[in-house]
Image: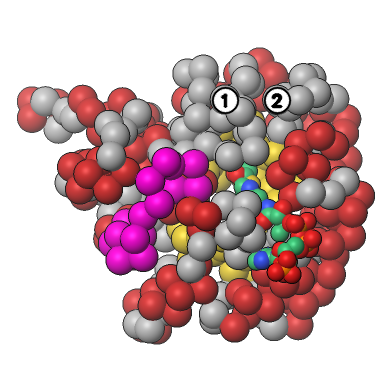
Amino acid sequence: MSVEIVEVGPRDGLQNEQTTLRLDDRIWLIERLSQAGLKRIEVGAFVSPQWVPQMANTAELCRKLFVDKKRTSKLRYSVLVPNLRGMSDAIAAGVKEIAVFGACSESFSLKNINCSIAESFSRFQDVIKVAKKNKIRVRGYLSTAFGCPYEGKVPFKRVLKLTEKMLDMGVFEVSIGDTIGVASPKQVKELVKPAMRIGGAKKLALHFHDTRGTALANVLSGLELGVKKFDSSVGGLGGCPYAKGASGNLATEDLVYMLTRMGEKTGVNLDTIMSMREPLEKMIGRKLPGRFIQAGLPKSLI
Ligand code: HMG
Ligand code: MG
């Protein structure tokens, strides 16, 4: 597999939908995505249900998902964990991979997780310590790397410093996030070049929201510099409830389509994703914003 896709629809996608999906529907979504060939799926979040009600019951979801141990041993299901409380809930639910999530701007950090950047990193340190003891893998997210909804521009120097700090703490990769979809391909190059020198392709992922239609162009910029891991959401679901204007993630099938046409392997079956459109739209009660899932492909071009 030449490009690795981290499917974040069941978490980043659903956390920003008006309709909270029933547990069985969340499980259907995750299982269909794994049948489509997605090997890494972010399935939920151990956050406060007061803050993000759409992610409530993630513990029960995990317990149900992990019943079939044979199947799940080939898949990597991860969850967001903001603090030690979330960590102990994740351990109890049998989770093997988590993600801590921090920000590159103070105001967003406060709005999203109710603490400063420094405080959040101190919490991550505690979480990572417990995770390591329990043989749990930890991914790191850095939000607002290309711009903050409250502060505007974010200096790349800060993003790079925080990337280095997260890696030093022991996360296996950092996903650099354009939370509100403001990045341009030129900016991506400016940030990714030095970021690749810090961690290399193995430790760097890019997470684009497609708010202003630049996500695929931004992926291309990253690819040209050797980035091999990208986050996306089926159908273009997604956003962040604490970043006004943060609409959907880059759609998984749009990403897969572009990569496949460029000769890259993703292991994802587009027909299976296409078959999800109708039931998923019914569940969320709106049309999915992804382009490929709406347009399909004429038989003559398959
Ligand atoms: P807080 O209110 O500061 O927490 O929230 P607290 O420690 O003061 O505790 C208050 C209450 O919450 C207590 O309950 C705790 O037990 C409970 P009480 O005693 O009042 O009954 N609590 C919890 N409950 C469940 N799970 C927990 C937990 N922790 C405390 N883990 C907190 C702090 C971090 C919990 C809160 O701010 C929160 O849940 N934030 C989550 C926000 C979120 O999920 N945002 C979206 C994900 S980030 C994102 O989308 C960006 C990303 O996609 C990348 C990108 O696009 O850039 C990753
Ligand atoms: Mg996001």
Give the quarter of the image for residue 162.
Answer: top right
Q: Residue at x 89, y 54 (%)?
A: 119
Quadrant containing ligand 1: bottom right
Front one among 118 and 269? 118
User: What secondary structure characterizes most of the magenta part?
Assistant: helix
Front one among 236 and 252? 236
Front one among 246 and 114? 114
Q: Is residue 74 above or below residue 122?
A: below
Q: Residue at x 66, y 15 (%)?
A: 186
Q: Is residue 80 above or below residue 87?
A: above
Left or right of 240? Residue 113 is right
Front one among 300 and 275? 275
The residue segment tinted magenta is 14-31
Give the secondary structure at mark 2. Answer: loop
Residue 36 visible, this angle? yes
Q: Residue at x 51, y 23 (%)?
A: 211
Give the secondary structure at mark 1. Answer: loop
* Residue 139 placement (x, y as % from top left): 66, 58
Alpha carbon separation for disc pair 2 and 1: 8 Å
The type of colouring in the image is: secondary structure
Q: Residue at x 47, y 18 (%)?
A: 213
* Residue 29 placement (x, y as % from top left): 32, 56
Give the quarter of the image for residue 83.
Answer: bottom right
- Identify the amino acid type marked 2: Pro
Dots 2 and 1: beta carbons under 8 Å?
A: yes
* Residue 54 placement (x, y as % from top left): 48, 53
Left or right of 179? Residue 70 is left
Magenta residue check for 162: no
Give the quarter of the image for residue 146.
Answer: top right
Q: Which residue is mark 2?
A: 149
Left or right of 264? Residue 292 is left
Q: Is residue 108 above or below residue 45?
A: above
